[in-house]
Image: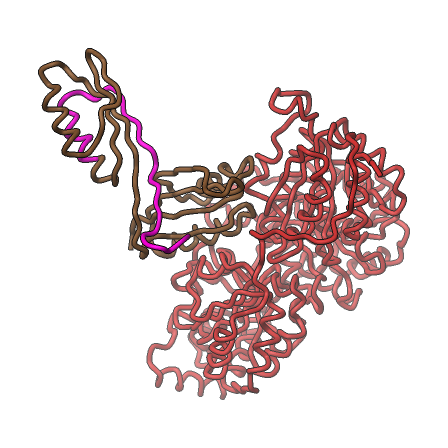
Amino acid sequence: MQQQHTITVLVDNKPGVLSRVAGLFSRRGYNIESLAVSITENPEVSRMTLVVNGDEQEVEQITKQLHKLIDVSKVQDYLNIPMVARELALIKVNALIENRTALLQLVEVFRGRVIDMSDKTFVIELTGGNDKIDAFEKLLEAYGIRELVRTGRIAMARGTRGI
Amino acid sequence: MKITGSRALLECLKREGVDTIFGYPGGAVIPIYDMIYQFPDIQHILVRHEQGAGHMAEGYALATGKVGVCLATSGPGATNLVTPIADAMMDSVPLVAITGQVKTSAIGTDAFQEADITGITMPITKHNWLVKDVTKLPEIIAEAFHIARSGRPGPVLIDIPVDISRAEFEYTPVEEVNIPTFKPTTKGHSRQIQRAAELIAEAKRPVLYVGGGAIYSGAYGEIKDLAERTNTPVTTTLKGLGAFPETHPLSLGMLGMHGTAYANYAISECDLLIAVGARFDDRVTGKVDEWVPTAKIIHIDVDPAEIGKVLPADVPIVGDVKAVMIELLKLVEPAFHPEWNARVAQWKSDFPLHYPMDGILHGQQVIEQIGAITNHEAIVVTDVGQHQMWAAQFYKCLRPRQFITSGGLGTMGFGLPAAIGAQFGAPDKPVFCVSGDGSIQMCIQELMVATIYKLPIKICILNNQYLGMVRQWQELFWESHYSNVDLEASPDFVKLAEAYGAHAIRCSSPSGVEAALAEAMAITDRPTVLDFRIAKEENVYPMIKSGGTIRDMVVQRPPNMTPLDSYMESEAYMPDGEARPAKEEEKTERETVTAG
């Protein structure tokens, strides 16, 4: 069954490691929906969060192949693990004077923030799951989105559980 | 004491037990070559093309079980190693490739002879390193050898900028390698091994399907023990040839696209498939869904990613094949399958490998006679194509590391350099390179190396003046459109061999083979090239087309037996997988016929 999997990969913080992981996906024909890379609590370790679609067998292959990379120390698929997951979006939207009140209300309902303002535009920051950001984006379309940037998903298990 | 990077490299290689390096110098590795000049313990073989160096290192590794080492300069030197590295990756050959690189400060500037070889080889190595700090060099070399030979073996590459080779540092030998992220599982899971033993005890029609992993882990004794104790027929993959003696009554030879009919029939009807160090390659399975539909599968492999990659295993066992087999054998009781063994024996006698006896020289005959004249003691190294399949079918390997071939990547040009590497690794064994008129021309330049080092390799060119395997496919599947497979215009291989200082023989008739081989065997101080002029349009059979099933198998019967068509209508014929029994009573009836 095709499902969306959120996979966290801990890698040694070394040059080339991102291209090793990305190269593995491209050469084996796996599609990455999103990818986020960051530092962690340990300066020698980087954390990658991948979102992939696939059936159980495909994703099992992906995790096994990831494990074979020498720079990879841990791989965790969060499919059956309660997790918190977030994405961040920055949206530059047209904000004419007559639309500003409505826009600010939207931002409040979605718990976003206006982080920059000009005479014609707002830059809005929004974090959340991808459905929430998708919904917000759809509502803003009426005003005219000038520019949009979104990070990949980052995720963590709920509770005391580590990776 | 302070030493240079290049001296440290040589010291480290010595510590790893390296006695032979295959390489080619160039600007970025001159400091390393200066050190090779000063290290008489390590023999350097000067090849004629870096691709040759890579394949020689592979041949050396495959013949000895040790790690092969090759060395090339930056840029084109390094990129010429790409094919052998990819070959080693596909066939799990332990290989350390060392390349020079432009000086650190010039990296990324499109400097002369610069190529991003770590980037290029990322997908075809287990791991690779660009050395940017000379003090890390000893550690990297130790890790490289450890990774190349541990778990599922494979190639690694170390890229050393020329200023790193020249830099001095305080050298301390690396005593122990510890890579926390690389800990291959060697010991199999005991519960799974227990379950495997249970399935083996329950099986009525078991087959052992043995791949190259069994050879690499040295599990042949255990495989023979398991096969004999449980009366289980054994088929091997191309890379598994030699893991089980092919003269043994339980041997089915090779399976798959050009495997024996009896191996493929046995696979199609088995109820338990014991896969040992094999990876369910598409040339073995054909159409996967219909390959072993009724069988339970035990899959033993050191690489967890191979298990479940192609077919789900009922009993997956990750671990070193030999270690797992030793544990498994403690639990396996003797088992007898007289009906199954009789059925398999019937297939063997009904569908023997054969070739026409029509007064024309055939490649298969040459292979058979190589076996006969060497008592099957020779190491046979092949190139890729029809000759490779005939060698796989007709040589009859007795021991592991006797059959060296490019399986996964199918690299034409592999044969001659790999044979040279094998002869360096096994100087006392007769080495035969079986090649074709196409393949041999892809690395012919390495013949010079064989001459210089007085290697008595017998290079048998099965010359049909065609790219035979492609021609066969064009004949069978492309309406005989023989597009660009004609090699009639080839060099005179006898003259060419003589120009390289080799002995040369031409043979065009079936009656001349024995004498030609005997003449070659008598030459011990240089290579011999044998130009066998074989039938032009011979095909390799049996054959199951790509992506096909057992029902697509094309089998030919020897002329002295009933022709296939009438045989299939006769009472003696045992239906193949097409009528694979769903009903128990039908099967019993058929087996009665067999027994009769």
Place of residue B364 in the rendered image (x, y in percent of width and height, measured from the top left): 67, 60
Residue drawn at 61 percent across, 51 percent down: B179
**Front position in the image: B76 or A100:** A100
**Front position in the image: B22 or B12:** B12
Can residue B153 be found in the magenta stretch?
Answer: no
Can residue A146 be found in the magenta stretch?
Answer: yes
- Residue B259, quarter of picture: bottom right
Q: Is residue B32 above or below residue B43?
A: above
Residue drawn at 82 percent across, 50 percent down: B19
**Front position in the image: B365 or A113:** A113
* Chain with red colouring: B
**Front position in the image: B185 or B113:** B185
Q: Is residue A109 above or below residue B207?
A: above
Question: Is there any visible trace of residue B557 in the rendered image?
Answer: no
Residue extent of the magenta highlight: A134-163
- Colour of chain A, in one word, is brown
Question: Is there any visible trace of residue B200 in the rendered image?
Answer: yes
